[in-house]
Amino acid sequence: MNNYRNDIYYCLKPFIPRKLQVYARRLLIQYQLVKYRNVWPIDEKGGKEPAGWKGWPYGKKFALVLTHDVDTSEGQSKCLELMKIDEDMGFRSSFNFVPLRYTVLPEVLSTLRQRGFEVGVHGLYHDGLYYLSKDTFLKRAARINSYLKEWGAVGYRAPSMYHKLDWFHELEIEYDASTFDTDPFEPHSVGVGTIFPFFVKDPVAPRGYVELPYTLPQDFSLFILMQKKNIEIWKQKLEWVAKRGGMALINTHPDYMNFCGSKSLEVYPVQLYEEFLKHVKDRYTGQYWHALPMDVARFWKNNY
């Protein structure tokens, strides 16, 4: 029923004014915050260590992974500024692009890769119409695979986190990052209930991929829908993940970051993201294994 409702929503979404979408979701999320207060931002069940757990590389307490989804051409125009923020703070991250929603610039991809960042594919179009039928998905998967190969990418994230993990075996990937431990505000709101990666085995072929759930709330939810003015929820969740030795994976969007004083309905000060990075360095120096998603996936596949 939930998937059917999502299909209807994504069919109607292009005809709903963007401002109306945002205002409606702001109203809805106030109700959801009360309803789901016992499982968000922390669901205690998600902190259980996986079977055979032996720890992160170098004896680090927890893993730290930074990812950015680039939803629009405007977001792409901010990528190198965001890259510089990560770089200046001593971090590296992945940037996921939507190849058929806007023209992905080769010079942006090459600059990111040359500076030690990772590039991934974020669907073909930023819609939720991948699962209307298996045939539809297979056609899109073939195009997604062509971009994975062209960009030298090994990771995928579905638009709006709308996923079917068993279908993703058709993608030529080492990892997927389309899930979360707990996030009842997403269209596909069922979490995977863990702050650790896990392997998704293909039941009919000797292959599989690693799933990397995001474990810190998305910036769009916090700062655009909930209209939070500080990073206290990020700090709270990060502390909980660190204490349980999990993976702190954050997903932010340059599209919604305000670098130049814009008055748009859908931006927040980029300084909030910078404050998060500074908090990580100041509070957790020496405690975390900071790695790109592909490195975490390879570590997990080789060890777990």
Image: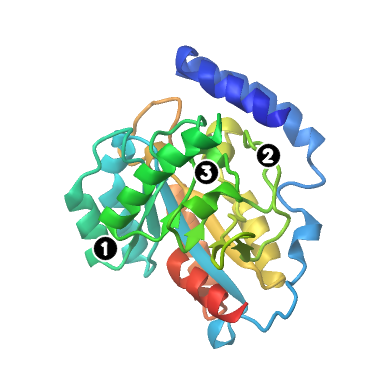
Residue 211 in percent (x, y) is at 58, 60
Q: Quadrant of residue 112?
A: bottom left
Q: Which disc is residue 61 wearing?
A: none
Q: Quadrant of residue 23?
A: top right
Residue 290 in percent (x, y) is at 48, 72
| Residue at x 33% of width, y 34% of height | 261
User: 192 and 253: which one is in front?
Assistant: 192
Q: Within 10 angstroms of label 3, few (less than 14), some, or many (20 or more) residues? A: many
Q: Quadrant of residue 124?
A: top left
Comes first in the chain, label 3 or label 1: 1
Label 2 sits on a secondary structure element that is loop
User: 47 and 175: which one is in front?
Assistant: 175
Mark 1 — residue? Answer: 113
Report the amino acid beneath label 2: Ser
Measure the C-alpha gap from mark 3 to mark 1: 24 Å
> Which-is-in-front pick, marks 3 and 2?
2
Q: Is residue 248 left or right of residue 95?
A: right
User: 277 and 146: which one is in front?
Assistant: 146
Mark 2 — residue? Answer: 189
Q: Is residue 38 left or right of residue 241?
A: right
Residue 187 in percent (x, y) is at 62, 33
| Residue at x 64% of width, y 37% of height | 188
Label 1 sits on a secondary structure element that is helix
User: Do we see residue 60 in this rendering?
Assistant: yes
Report the amino acid beneath label 1: Arg
Q: Is residue 225 left or right of residue 264?
A: right
Report the amino acid beneath label 3: Asp
Q: Within 10 angstroms of label 1, few (less than 14), some, or many (20 or more) residues? A: some
In the rendered image, the quadrant that contains the N terminus is top right
Label 3 sits on a secondary structure element that is helix
Comes first in the chain, label 2 or label 1: 1
Mark 3 — residue? Answer: 219
